[in-house]
Image: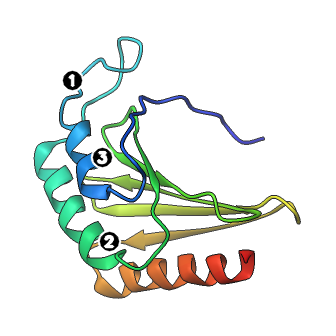
Amino acid sequence: MYETREYPTSGTPPSDIPARLDELRALQDGWYDGYGSAPSSQGLDWLRQHAAHNLGDSPAPYIYPTPEGGVQFEWDIGSFRPSLEIDLETRVGEWHCLNIDEDEAHERELQLERPQDWQWLAERLLLLQGRAT
């Protein structure tokens, strides 16, 4: 089954990606019940720049830290529950999309240093949004 995680949230609207990423800078090592690495400032800077540039027209994600020092983007698009877990060190994203109506899941590894992988992500989100409406 799928793991449910509870991470710090804020009142920042999902549409404000840069502000939410900036909030994650306040985390310190041990933020998750005494465990959990804080995301690096350098990694957050990189993600802020790339997400703002590449996801501008896409549905806005909810953004959470991961205990491994990464960041997770999650979307709620109709019957689709896509997420992208981003390793800020390797700049690799693990895409997972669950269709709750059909109980189907799709996964893909994205090399987020490559513009074509950001393009794939943006197009996929818009496609899911179109199918959900």
Callout 3 amino acid: Arg
* Residue 113 left/right relative to 76: left
Q: Residue 20 carries which label?
A: 3
| Res 54 quadrant in image | bottom left
Residue pointed to by mark 1: 28
Callout 2 amino acid: Leu
- Looking at this view, name the residue that lies furthest to the left: 42
Crowdedness of circle 1 by 10 Å Cα count: few (<14), some, many (20+)?
Answer: some
Crowdedness of circle 3 by 10 Å Cα count: few (<14), some, many (20+)?
Answer: many
- Does the residue at mark 3 contact the one at mark 1 (Cβ under 8 Å)? no
Rounded to the nearest angstrom, the CA distance separating label 1 from label 2 is 25 Å
Q: Which residue is drawn at 54% across and 28% down?
A: 6
Crowdedness of circle 2 by 10 Å Cα count: few (<14), some, many (20+)?
Answer: many
Rounded to the nearest angstrom, the CA distance separating label 3 from label 1 is 16 Å
Sequence-first disc among 1 and 2? 1
Sequence-first disc among 2 and 3? 3
| Res 34 quadrant in image | top left
Residue pointed to by mark 2: 112
